[in-house]
Image (cartoon, grey):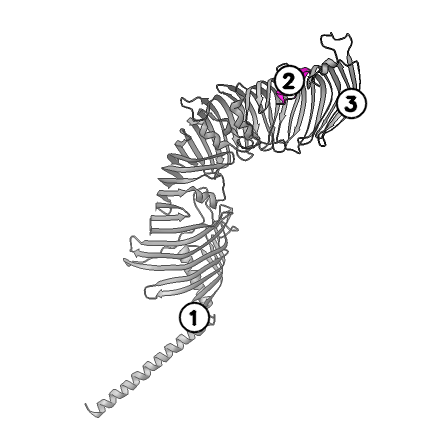
Amino acid sequence: MTSETRRRKWRWLRHVAWVLAAKVFLILLILTGVAIFFGSGAGNPLIQRYVVHTLERVTGGQVALKSISIRWLSLEITMKGLVIHGREPAGTEPLFAADEVQAGLRIDSFWGRKVSLNDLLVQRPQVHIRVEKDGSSNVPVPQNASSRKPTRETLFDLRIRRLQLQNGWILYNDVRTPLAVEGNNLRLALDASRSANEPMYLGTIDWQSIQFTAKRFLPWPVSVSAKFMLRRDGFTLEQGILSAGRSHVDAQVEMQDYLQPKWSFRYRGWVNLLDLRENLRSPETPTGLVDVHGEGTFADGQLHGSGSYSGHDITLTYPIFRASGLSSRGSVQMDNSGLVVPDFLALAFGGTVKGRVTMRFDGLKFRADTHVQDAHLAGVLPAIEHPGFPVDELHWDTLISADTTETWSGPFQHFEITGTMQWVSPDTVAFGHIPVDGDWEIRYRYDPETLMVNSGEFETPASRGTISGLLAPRNTGIDVRFETGALESYRDFINAIRDTPPNSPDAIKVITGSARWEGKISGPSGGPTFAGHVRGEGVRYDGLALDSVEGELSYSPEELTFSRAHLWSGPMDAVMDLALELHKWSFLPDSTWSADVNLEATPVDALQQLLSLSYPVRGDLSGQFHGHGTRKAPSVTGLFDLANGEAYSVTFNRLRGQLTLMPDEVRIGNAELRLFPPEKEPGHGAGIVTGSAGYNFLDRSASIDLVGASLPLANFQKL
């Protein structure tokens, strides 16, 4: 190589170096200018126009964006005033709007076009969906991208580590619904396989740890995963899984023809009703586990579907009806108006409930026409017992046959039931229960918590009765006719009405006899008043025993009155008016009372036997007595006449006077004692004693002021 050749090579190398240096400098200068241009915000209008154009191409709508700002070093983007208009009429809410969208972007692979979002925050998102009667909506159709390349490429693989939608709402056909969604770990991937004849998009979405809140409902933990496909002629959801709380649903959906959509779908769900009860704040909703599955189509505005369900471990917790361990199953048919369960079946209380259940989509109105067969009353009574209505303590058992109609709205709101029932004594009665027959016509309404008994009749081996009227929380009014030959079978029922445990000191220990009562139950159901005419025969009530009793009885938590009462016990014949002040059915030591008693020639022995007393006094007592005071401090006054008497072995023909009995003293004033000698006929001369006498129980002192004459000493032999 000559020196001239070497010089030409060196000159060429220096020239190339200068050219490369100039190009590098120019590139750096351009990059610096671009960085300064966009970093200063001067290029934001260009970016804004590009974003608007891209969104319009993707959504097919008209996009407006007030401003966009980018922090290039931290890759944070803020868009304000984002509005997407669809095909809604002018002057209505847009398809989508958001006051502000903040995104923290991270590029995972530039050449692989893989990006992820650390955070995505959407402030006040507003979604407006409008569907017309002809099935058209305001959702625009995206512009189709044209390409002749028969290739498949990944459009994007998007991951969002935290997504927040704050203070948003959804408007559907002019019904606005508050909405808030917050979740973590959103991943959305979309692949495109485009050809001249059949473009296709394959996508997957996976979003876990979502907190969904709408209306007044509690936040609902939700997760979604789906695999879908978009084609020129339709859409396919190959598998979609929605998990919400303890429940989840698996679905497949296919849609053909975007212009005249024809949908077909299949689903399988496992629903825990406790999710609905808690998150919808609906205490009326039952709890339990339900398995549902079915399929259907939707085309030309017509919905057709079928499926089935089965539920078990169902628990009902209405205030007037509580039951658990129930099960149900049936098939489901759907159309535009609603759904129908033509073969509804429920198993409860040893019997079956069969019938037809319908639901209208408009207002979520439900109706069930059912037939109950062979349900055991012994299991039903504990389910309907509540304070003031202690029916379980009746200890009745029967087989129930009923035809009922139930209606309600949404999650068992505004529940009502009407029906007729027949009770038939079972061949085998539950242990400790009494067989009963009857016929009933009832109507129950949940909102006012009322039970209307249009007519009711029942009969046991020893009792029978009729019932009609309204059971309500505040204004109960029930007419009752009842008679029994075995009051002892209602001891637990009476104790329960008095809210007294069977083994408590205040509980009735002994009650026997027969009784008839015709009257009315009125007032609040939690503390009703029993008022009417009662007659009893051979009645024994703890220590009180009567051959017969009759009168007007009124019994409530505050008072017991027995007016115009007539009492017979052996030769005793008494007329009485009684009033006791009660506190929650109990006669306490400080409770007041009053009584007026008229006696006519009543043997003292009969009175002592009635009152469980034993004093050495005999005779026939007549008089008018008035009692009052409290249970611990009673007092009695009255005029009395004791004929043919004997007291402490002193015989006399007549003792009359004014009696005053108090807790610490007994006094007889204006007394007159007449004594006839033995074997002398009355009216032929007698001894007489007049005056007053008293005895103090505290200091055991006596005061006597008597005047006597012609006393036959033979009458005082023991004295």
Identity of the residue drawn at 64% across and 29% down: 559
In the image, residue 617 above or below residue 97: above
Using residue 5 as the reference point, say whether residue 421 is left or right of it: right
Q: Indicate the secondary structure of the residue bearing disc 2.
A: helix
Q: Indicate the secondary structure of the residue bearing disc 1.
A: loop
Mark 2 residue crowding within 10 angstroms, few (<14) / some (14–19) / many (20+): many
Q: Quadrant of the C terminus?
A: top right
The span from disc 2 to disc 1 (Cα, nearest Å) is: 111 Å
What's drawn in magenta, residue-wise? 601-620
> Where does the image place residue 42, in percent across and percent down from the top left?
47, 70
* Amino acid at circle 1: Leu
* Amino acid at circle 3: Ser
* Residue at which label 1 appears: 73
Magenta segment includes 138: no
Q: Nearer the viewer, mark 1 or mark 3?
A: 3
Tell which circle, 2 or 1, labels the residue nearer the N-terminal end. Answer: 1
Considering every residue shown, the one lying at the far bottom of the view is 3
Mark 3 residue crowding within 10 angstroms, few (<14) / some (14–19) / many (20+): some
Identity of the residue drawn at 74% across and 8% down: 682
The span from disc 3 to disc 2 (Cα, nearest Å) is: 25 Å
Label of residue 605 in the image: 2
Label of residue 692 in the image: 3
Q: Nearer the viewer, mark 2 or mark 1?
A: 2
